[in-house]
């Protein structure tokens, strides 16, 4: 039997927003280690990181997938993703980052979000036996220190003048 997933991936209805964990974070009703909070979106540490510093960037409006993001919101949303990806190497002492978006398949929360995963050349994230093993933080102090390092890097970034 096939299930209709359209209700789960509904864009912006009060029912989906009420049950959405990311909407709860945006409203301030759920805890999160927020590193950036701007009109175009919000960025916070993933609770089940692939590697320390794994972030999720999500638009404020409840939009289920990239296809549902209004054209005028694409630039501002991806601008946040770009800004964060740019500061990750210096903030966390890594070599780069992996940026990805799942649309429905493998999308655990039906609210559009980009993953920014800090990368090192030897992290084996894409090893021969690709298994997206989660690497939780050792403790709250480590998680908070990672979030603070990213916040500081974002606060000190040099942004081009428009």
Image: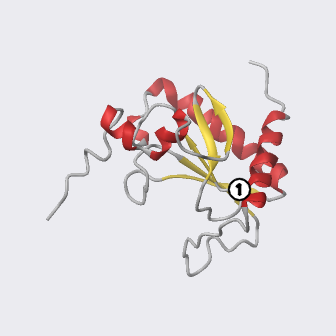
Left or right of 145 on screen, residue 125:
left
Q: Which residue is pictured at 63% across the width and 46% down the height?
A: 44
11 or 105, which lies in front?
Answer: 11
* Image coordinates for residue 157, horizontal then vertical, percent: 83, 35
162 or 42, which lies in front?
Answer: 42
Residue extending furthest toward the front: 29
Q: Which residue is pictured at 55% across the width and 53% down the height?
A: 100
The quarter of the picture where the C terminus appears is top right
Left or right of 161 on screen, residue 48:
left
* Image coordinates for residue 33, horizontal then vertical, percent: 66, 47
Q: Number of callouts in the render? A: 1
Asked which quadrant contains residue 76, the reply is top right
As drawn, 5 above or below 15: below
Left or right of 3 on screen, residue 78:
right
The residue carrying mark 1 is 53
Residue extending furthest toward the left: 1
Asked which quadrant contains residue 50, the reply is bottom right
The quarter of the picture where the N terminus appears is bottom left
Asked which quadrant contains residue 54, the reply is bottom right
* Image coordinates for residue 139, horizontal then vertical, percent: 73, 65
Q: Secondary structure at mark 1?
A: loop
146 or 25, which lies in front?
Answer: 25
Q: Which residue is pictured at 49% across the width and 43% down the height?
A: 22
* Image coordinates for residue 120, horizontal then vertical, percent: 76, 65
As drawn, 79 above or below 72: below
Disc 1 crowd, CA 10 A, few/some/many (<14, 14-19, 20+): many
């Amino acid at each position: 039997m096939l299930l209709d997933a359209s209700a789960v991936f509904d864009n912006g209805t009060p029912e989906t927003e009420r049950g959405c964990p990311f909407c709860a974070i945006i409203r301030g009703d759920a805890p999160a280690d927020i590193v950036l909070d701007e009109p175009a979106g919000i960025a916070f540490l993933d609770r089940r990181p692939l590697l320390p510093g794994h972030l999720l960037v999500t638009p404020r409006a409840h939009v289920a997938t990239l296809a549902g993001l209004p054209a005028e919101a694409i630039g501002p949303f991806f601008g946040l993703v770009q800004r964060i990806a740019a500061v990750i190497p210096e903030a966390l002492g890594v070599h780069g980052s992996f940026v990805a978006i799942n649309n429905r398949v493998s999308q655990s929360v039906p609210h559009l979000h980009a993953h920014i995963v800090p990368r090192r050349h030897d992290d084996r994230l894409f090893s021969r036996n690709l298994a997206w093993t989660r690497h939780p933080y050792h403790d709250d102090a480590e998680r908070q220190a990672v979030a603070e390092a990213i916040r500081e890097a974002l606060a000190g970034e040099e942004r081009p003048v428009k």
